[in-house]
Image: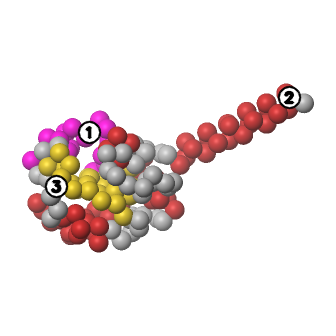
Amino acid sequence: MMAIGKRLISGFLVLVVSSLMFLTSPAIAATSSDVLTLTPENFETEVVKSDKPVVVILISDTTREALEVSLDKVKSEAQTTFGDKYKIVLGTVEANPETYYQTPVPRIYPPISTASIYEKGTKIASGFFINPNDPRQEFESIKDFNY
């Protein structure tokens, strides 16, 4: 009887782990050719060493898939709001946990999308938005905010 229970648990764990591999795919760049994808590896060059202030937008893979979020549309909305004075980069919450957890947001699942402004590597404004298909209001609220 114990052996059957162990086999069932092992089989269940294999299914769960296999499913998670599909949900947390870091291949967000494959969905859009014009979107600069933020990773922990390029954070230093794209954000810290940038000549312009940088708008960092992080969206959960789960949210992106469930709401069919167009990264091109999110980036376009950010460019319309912030203009040429800012560099816009997008990434996933899953691929950038350190950056994500620096923003005070409710810790729920799926993770809430965030937008932060960095200047010379220092975060000067941040916020979160529930619907990544319509982030305009959040972008406007952090645009001219300084700590």
Q: Element at badge 1? A: loop
Distance of mark 2 from mark 3, alpha carbons?
Answer: 59 Å
Which labelled disc corresponds to residue 42? 1
- Residue 43 in picture, x, y percent from top left: 25, 40
Quadrant (top left, top right, bottom left, bottom right) of the N terminus: top right
Q: Nearer the viewer, mark 1 or mark 2?
A: 2
Q: Residue placed at 79% from the left, 32% from the top?
A: 7
Q: Is residue 57 positioned above or below 68 on the image?
A: above
Which labelled disc corresponds to residue 147? 3
Quadrant (top left, top right, bottom left, bottom right) of the C terminus: bottom left
Left or right: 44, with 10 as reference point? left
Q: Residue placed at 34% from the left, 40% from the top?
A: 98
Does residue 14 appear in this view? yes
Q: Nearer the viewer, mark 2 or mark 3?
A: 3
Q: Range of the magenta residues?
A: 32-51
Q: Residue placed at 38% from the left, 55% from the top?
A: 105
Q: Mark 3: which amino acid?
A: Tyr
Left or right: 20, with 78 as reference point? right
Lower position in the chain sequence, tag 2 or tag 3: 2
